[in-house]
Image (spheres, rainbow, N blue to C red):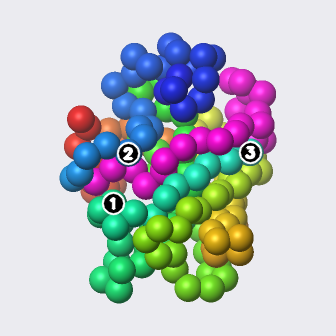
Amino acid sequence: MSTMYGPLFAPADRYLRQPRMPAPLPLPLPLDRVTGIAAEPGSMGTSTRWTETGVRFDSGHLGPVGRMPAGIVVEAGQAHPPDRGERVYRLLGCEPTHHGSPPLPGEALQYEVPVDGHGGVRLFFPHDCCVGGGALRLSMRDGQACFLTDDVLARAHIRTPREP
């Protein structure tokens, strides 16, 4: 965590669960780097994150036509600090809008992800925009996301990726 978010997050390096930068397959996160954060640490207030990802031939994130599918484009901008390693992040829903064709390998995508607010302890409301090749590629509004425990995931029949 401290590699992505800075020294303030060094205690989180010990958490079992946390967002991770790309690693070998089966399927790394599509996010390559966090380039900026505007937030009051530990406040659970509004915030903005800037992230980047490169669309790669070998990433495992390309659809059947050789382009990055919309769901991956939306998820590629997300990089949320862990919830003490006890819960996993899930994007519950959003309204994406495409502005042009899906990204191709070799493109670099830049994201700005504001979090407009929080509803309760672990529910929050992001929106974002994705720029690639100097043009707006995708925007997302009315996002709903949360951190869920293993118990909640099991009862909801939502599968969790295997932890490394």
Q: Position of residue 84 (x, y in %)?
A: 47, 24
Q: Is residue 39 visible?
A: yes
Question: Which element is circle 1 on?
Answer: loop
At 62% across and 81% down in the image, what residue appears?
Answer: 98
Does the stretch in magenta take in 18?
no
State the quadrant of the C terminus: top left
Residue 99, above or below 145: below
Q: Disc 2, disc 1: CB below 8 Å?
A: yes
Residue 44 sits in quarter: top right
Residue 13 sits in quarter: top left
Q: Residue furthest front?
A: 106
At 61% across and 23% down in the image, what residue appears?
Answer: 6
Residue 56, above or below 78: below
Q: Disc 3, disc 2: CB below 8 Å?
A: no
Instruction: Name the disc covering residue 59, or none.
Output: 1
- The residue that label 2 is drawn on is 22
- The residue that label 3 is drawn on is 48
**Which three-letter amino acid code belongs to the residue tagged 3?**
Thr
Question: Which element is circle 3 on?
Answer: strand
- Nearer the observer: mark 3 or 2; the answer is 2
At 48% across and 50% down in the image, what residue appears?
Answer: 31
**Which three-letter amino acid code belongs to the residue tagged 1?**
Ser
Does the stretch in magenta take in 32?
yes
Drawn side of residue 145 relative to residue 115, left or right: left
Depth check, front residue: 84 or 113: 113
Magenta segment: 27-47
